[in-house]
Image (cartoon, helix red, strand yellow):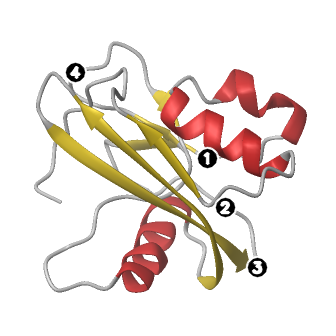
């Protein structure tokens, strides 16, 4: 996913996902976010790993859960969404250049290389993300 954030000068590539809404379970949030951001209805599989980080500038705590998902169809950019502006499949060899944020890139690349860790920690996220919406 390529997304625009109010405080970032250029859009950022990231994995599909987002924040849970109040009273929403993690799996339901994952299914909703995938549909909203890619137009794909997904089936959630195994949890691969967790990655945790802090945005030291704002004191925001992030906990990312990365799951295996299955989908059919073609991903698409949602119409009229000012946040999600691009969606594409990326070759494994090109992931490092597409994912500029280390807290996303490094655990994913380690997992895909066969690293069996299920938890990654980043005391400093190295980036501040402002969200335009309350969720």
> Residue beneath label 3, please?
72
As rendered, which of 28 and 63 lies closer to the eye? Answer: 63
Crowding around mark 4 (Cα neighbors within 10 Å: few <14, some 14 to 19, many 20+) is few
Crowding around mark 3 (Cα neighbors within 10 Å: few <14, some 14 to 19, many 20+) is few
- Horizontal placement of 107 versus 114: left or right? left
Mark closer to the chain start, 2 or 1: 2
Given contact means CB atoms under 8 Å apart, are the residues at marks 3 and 4 in contact? no
- Whether 112 is drawn above or below 50: the answer is above
The residue sitting at 72% across, 78% down in the picture is 71
Identify the disc placed on residue 96. Answer: none
Q: CA distance from mark 3 to mark 4?
A: 34 Å
Mark closer to the chain start, 3 or 4: 4
As rendered, which of 50 and 90 lies closer to the eye? Answer: 50
The residue sitting at 19% across, 33% down in the picture is 130
Q: CA distance from mark 2 to mark 3?
A: 9 Å
Q: CA distance from mark 1 to mark 3?
A: 15 Å
As rendered, which of 48 and 91 lies closer to the eye? Answer: 48
Given contact means CB atoms under 8 Å apart, are the residues at marks 2 and 1 in contact? yes
Q: Is residue 80 something that shows in the picture?
A: no
Q: Picture coordinates of residue 103 (x, y %)? A: 49, 35
């Amino acid at each position: 996913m390529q997304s625009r954030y109010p405080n970032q000068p250029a859009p950022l590539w990231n994995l599909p996902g987002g924040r849970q809404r109040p009273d929403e379970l993690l799996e339901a949030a994952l299914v909703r976010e995938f549909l909203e951001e890619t137009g794909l209805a997904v089936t959630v599989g195994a949890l691969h790993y967790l990655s945790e980080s802090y945005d030291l500038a704002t004191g925001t705590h992030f906990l990312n859960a990365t799951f295996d998902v299955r989908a059919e169809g073609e991903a698409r950019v949602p119409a009229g969404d000012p946040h999600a502006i691009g969606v594409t499949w990326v070759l494994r060899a090109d992931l490092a250049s597409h994912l500029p944020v280390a807290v996303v890139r490094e655990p994913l690349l380690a997992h895909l290389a066969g690293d069996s860790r299920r938890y990654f920690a980043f005391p400093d996220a190295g980036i501040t993300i402002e969200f335009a919406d309350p969720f």
